[in-house]
């Protein structure tokens, strides 16, 4: 085990950001105050944020680098483009799922917990299966440890339990009563 734990800190930054992503994405969609097109408006701003963070920031770093080379192998470019496309479709899927849950009459807190629990427990399962398919273990499928398979089953069970047994949200807070000048 390496003594450098930077990988873990960076992973925890992603956990924090993506854990908050669904909550704020849903709030942004609702904040658009447009039941029909609010999710698309929210997705537009997600795209703007991606442009700022994923285009302008690395471009600035590359331009400031002393050893910058604009040589980029096609395989790296296409795989990175595919990854970005999958990420964008995934973000769009989050919005569509939340919008569909809201249309079905689910309270916003229930929608956010259900959708994000399924996504964030399901994604590592997909990642594990595809990684094994792309890079099979030495010794074939029989070499996969039972603990790995148990972990996938536990993740799937946990997702089901979080979605099925999520707490019922309380009543929304009462709106303050406004007193007009004529009532004083």
Image (cartoon, grey):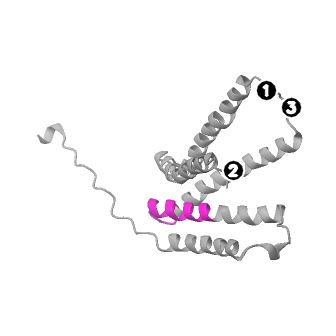
Residue drawn at x 18%, y 43% is 179
In this rendering, which labeled residue sits more in front, label 3 or label 1? 1
At mark 2, the secondary structure is: helix
Looking at the image, is mark 2 or mark 1 nearer the viewer?
1
The residue identified by callout 2 is 87
Spatial CA distance of label 3 from label 1 is 9 Å
Residue 159 placement (x, y as % from top left): 57, 70
Q: Residues within 10 Å of mark 2 (few under 14, many from 20)?
A: few
Identify the image quadrant of residue 121. bottom right
Residue 84 in picture, x, y percent from top left: 73, 46
Quadrant of image for the C terminus = top left
| Magenta extent | 102-121
Question: Does residue 59 lie above or below 136 as drawn?
Answer: above
* Magenta segment, prevailing SS (helix, strand or loop): helix
Mark positioned earlier in the residue sequence (3 or 2): 3
Q: Which mark is residue 92?
A: none
Q: Is residue 165 above or below residue 118?
A: below
What is the quadrant of residue 97 in the picture?
bottom right
Q: Secondary structure at mark 3?
A: loop
Asked whether residue 77 is drawn in magenta, I would say no
**Cα distance in 3D space between marks 3 and 2:** 24 Å
Residue depicted at x 66% and y 61%: 123
Counting residues from the N terminus, which is met first, the one under dot 2 or under dot 1? 1
Question: In the figure, 31 relative to 57: above or below?
Answer: below
The disc placed on residue 71 is 3
Horizontally, residue 177 falls left or right of residue 88, namely left
Name the one closer to the observer, 100 or 121. 121
Left or right: 104 in relation to 94: left
Residue marked by disc 1: 68
Position of residue 17 relative to residue 166, above or below, is above
């Amino acid at each position: 085990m390496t003594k450098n734990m930077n990988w873990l800190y960076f992973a925890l930054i992603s956990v924090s950001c993506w854990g908050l992503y669904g909550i704020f994405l849903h709030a942004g969609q609702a904040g658009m105050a447009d039941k029909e097109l609010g999710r698309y408006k929210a997705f537009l701003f997600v795209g703007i944020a991606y442009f700022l963070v994923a285009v302008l920031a690395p471009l600035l770093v590359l331009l400031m680098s002393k050893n910058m080379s604009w040589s980029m192998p096609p395989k790296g470019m296409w795989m990175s483009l595919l990854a970005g496309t999958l990420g964008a479709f995934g973000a769009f899927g989050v919005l569509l799922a939340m919008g569909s849950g809201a249309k079905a009459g689910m309270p916003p807190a229930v929608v956010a917990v259900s959708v994000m629990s399924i996504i964030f427990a399901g994604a590592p399962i997909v990642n594990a299966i595809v990684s094994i398919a792309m890079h099979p273990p030495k010794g074939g499928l029989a070499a996969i440890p039972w603990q790995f398979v148990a972990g996938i089953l536990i993740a799937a069970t946990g997702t089901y339990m979080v979605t099925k047994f999520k707490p019922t949200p309380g009543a929304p807070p009462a709106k303050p009563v406004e007193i007009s000048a004529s009532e004083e």
